[in-house]
Image (cartoon, grey):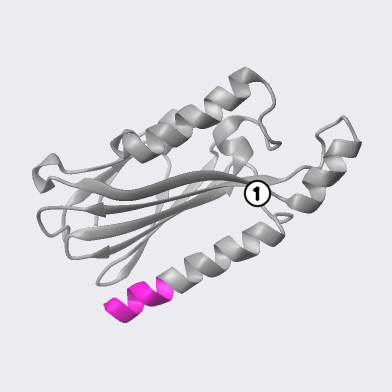
Amino acid sequence: MKSALVTLGFLFTACAMAGEHSLHSHEHGALKLGMAVEKNTVDIDMDGPAESFLGFEYAPKTAKEKKLLADLEAKWTKNLEAFIAFDKKLNCKVSEASFKQIIEEKEAAASKKDSKESGVHSEIEATAKVVCAANLAGSEVSISLRKIFTHIKKLSVEVLSGETKSVEITKPVQVFKL
């Protein structure tokens, strides 16, 4: 199991590193959520075009846009259960979390020369580590991302535990077993 989590970690790291260099091939409205579960711990990795979260891809400019990004970051890092909730009986706590907008540098520089924001690509990369008081095996998780982010058209969840499970989230709030 440890080796499976290490492999998943390398995959997430490789995807994140690749994302920092080239964001050309992302699909607007498509989000990927990965969850690596081991006993009472789950590592979460979420990636998708910033447009799916913010409604735009460029760096926030107005006070309203900056507040939107800051509010989402605060909600993810301090209130993760608004997005992803585990059974309350498990007494889960977030031990680490990050939520960042990654803007492709080459395109960001080009957009400064051109007042239009067309062609700018950015993604949201969010991670979290959740530690629970009890084993997560067979428990339920509730995903509310489509309820919160109405720009999401396709949401794929891949859960790596004893086996790999893929779930397509089609409802605003969807519950499934880990």
Residue 154 spot, x, y in % from top left: 52, 45
Q: 38 left or right of 158?
A: left
Residue plotted at (68% across, 35% down):
59
Q: Amino acid at mark 1?
A: Glu
Image vertical order of residue 18 relative to residue 149, above or below: below
**7 relative to 54 in the view: left or right:** left
Between 67 and 159, the one lying in front of the other is 67
Q: Is residue 128 above or below residue 78?
A: below
Judging depth in this view, the residue of 174 and 73 nearest the camera is 73
Q: Nearer the viewer, residue 27 or 104?
A: 104
Question: Looking at the image, which residue is at 85% across and 31% down?
Answer: 116
Span of residues in magenta:
1-8
Q: Count the numbered circles shown.
A: 1
Residue at 54% across, 31% down: 69
Q: Which residue is mark 1?
A: 27
In the image, residue 142 lies at what x, y percent?
28, 41
At mark 1, the secondary structure is loop
Q: Is residue 37 left or right of residue 16?
A: left
- Please identify the dominant SS of the magenta region: helix
Report which quarter residue 145 is drawn in.
top left
- Can residue 51 be spotted in the picture? yes
- In the rendered image, residue 2 lying in the magenta stretch gets the answer yes
